[in-house]
Amino acid sequence: MVNPLLLVRPRRRRTTDLRQHRVDIPAQPPGADAIFLLLRRMRMPLIVLVLVFAVSVFGLSAAPGTDSDGNPYHLTIFEAFYVMSYTATTIGFGEIPYAFSTSQRLWVTGSIYASVVAWAYAIGMVLSLTQDESFRDAVAAQRFARKVRHQQDGFHIIAGYGGAGHRVAHALDLIRCRFVIIDSDGIRIDRLETEQLAAEAPGIQGDAASPAVLGLAGLGHKRCAGVLALTGDDLVNLGVVQAVHLLRPELPVIAWSRDRTIAEHMREFGATAVLNPYDRFGAYLTIGLRRPVTLQLMQWLMSPLGTPVPDVPHAVPDGTWLVVAEGSFKHEIERDLHTAGYAVVHRAPHEGIGDCRSFVGFVAGADSDTVNLALGAEVRRQAPDVFLCLRQSRAAAAPLYEAFAPDSTFLATDLVARECFARIVTPRMWKFLEKVGAKDEAWSQAFLDHVVTRCGPGSPNGWRLSINEAEAPGVMRWLTHDELTLDQLLRHPADREEYAPIVVLALRRDGIFTAAPPESTALRPGDELLLASPPRGYAYVRDALFNEAVVEYVATGRAVPTTWVWRRVADLTGRSVVRR
């Protein structure tokens, strides 16, 4: 009997640093060893085969026979083994080394029928095993694990391949970012085989909150860059956050949650970001209502590269909104509208809208797209000038909403996918966008004009630059004896009177993040810059980053010779060339 006191673990020292308590991450779920299942199921057929073969061999060696001269002869064990090997495998080389006697032929005849029965039993068991669901799952799990182990590039684990997960996966595939899929729906996993992806994406059916499944998906892999918990179940997403935090606390994890209580639990377990689509949509809506230019700037910077500047959403005056919604969406949208200073009247979807001409805005947030479109049509008939916001429940209904053209459309999976993609690709850009969301209209308009003037009307590419010896050795050497400002660094290396098409979005110095710092700011070693530019914007500052002579030109206007010959000529003449 086990001592129950041994089941109680000694209390360990409490600490917030989970790296001190690292445990091995399971590499596969229990029962996923296909070889073990094969051997266990084939144990009896193999025993029967071996037994039949052994009895046949020893019986044939004991059966009396004669040699070519008619003398008594018994086959050796090896000769009997050889004869039974080609007999049992239907090759049939004949009676060797001598013609068999009647006793030997009788024994071989019985052995043939016995081996046929044994082989039929074994082959039938193999065929039955290939149809067994547990065996096929084990084979699929091992194939999946092998693909994950062979990942050479950084990858993300996407838990949930529904609407949001599907959108994020395809967006990551466009920029050649690898990912691994976990989903409880086998149909979605099977769909991966027919997806038009640039690279094969491993996928497995299972419980995403299971540490074993996460381990199989590469949670312990050194190339794993992060985890996205995007299943439709908030509790499963919470389980994913807990597993990542306890097993790989250094990995970033982004989770989707519609419930504020569960979202708070996710934050307690160290989630990098918790996305509540209902709350986020309300926040964007109120920004657009009160500060339309700020929303225009944020949407433009979040758009794919080269997207034109979107139209400014029209502001909505003070007044009362009619909200016809249900569930969590109703509570979140009402809370955000109240925060923005609007009065709100709520009605259930089955109650209808009544007379809506006195309202300044209308939100249809039922769970049915048919109901929302019908409500929107009724509002548009009664009061065409009312700001119309419709909730889209299914992605497949997008053509209907596009044709209806409301003032604002909310699709939870689309909003979550956009934010996930922005946080993964350019996390510092997302922090900058959060800063932009708190700015007033004047600042947003001025900054938008500045970026468009410098970079053009297409949405720019955000990228990071660190002022250190690895990324900017020329600048580092210059800073040892002179000052260099952001304005000077962004001068065009061919003509310093012009600016390169680059804008500084943010500066991180000593842990402090500053959005849109003045271009008169002097650089310091260790600074991190978030820059925005058209494609290939890095090429404009590359020479200045690595060549101190180019740094001197953009900083002072002096063209310093870079070759040995021209340096000797400059030394002899005692002159320096100044380009204006």
Image (cartoon, grey):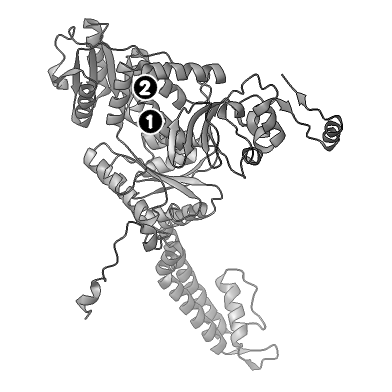
x then y, percent, for residue 153: 55, 47
Tag on residue 285? none
| Most foreground residue, 346 or 567 | 567
From the viewer's perspective, tell me whether residue 21 is left or right of residue 455.
Answer: left
Measuring from the top left, give residue 123's x and y in whole percent. Answer: 46, 63
Quadrant of the rendering where the C terminus is positioned: top right
**Helix, strand or loop for disc 2:** helix
Q: Is residue 395 above or below residue 143?
A: above
* Pick the front one: 522 or 408: 522
Residue under the point 56% across and 29% down = 486
The image position of residue 5, as x and y in percent, is: 21, 76
Mark 2 vs mark 1: give the one in front.
1
**Mark 2 crowd level (few <14, some 14–19, many ≥20, 10 Å Cα):** some
Which mark, residue 434? Answer: 1
Task: Classify the position of the N terminus by image quarter.
Answer: bottom left
Q: Could you tell me if residue 308 is visible in this image?
A: no
* Front one among 44 and 251: 251
525 relative to 516 in the view: left or right: right
User: Amino acid under label 2?
Assistant: Ala
Q: How crowded is mark 1: few (under 14 residues within 10 Å), some or many (20 or more)?
A: few
Q: Which of marks 2 and 1 is nearer the N terminus?
A: 2
Per the image, the residue denoted by label 2 is 398
In the image, what residue occupies the spot 53% across and 19% down? 458
| Spot occupied by residue 495 in the image (x, y as percentages of width and height) | 69, 21
Q: Which residue is drawn at 63% across and 35% down?
A: 482
Residue at x 44%, y 75% (from the top left corner): 48
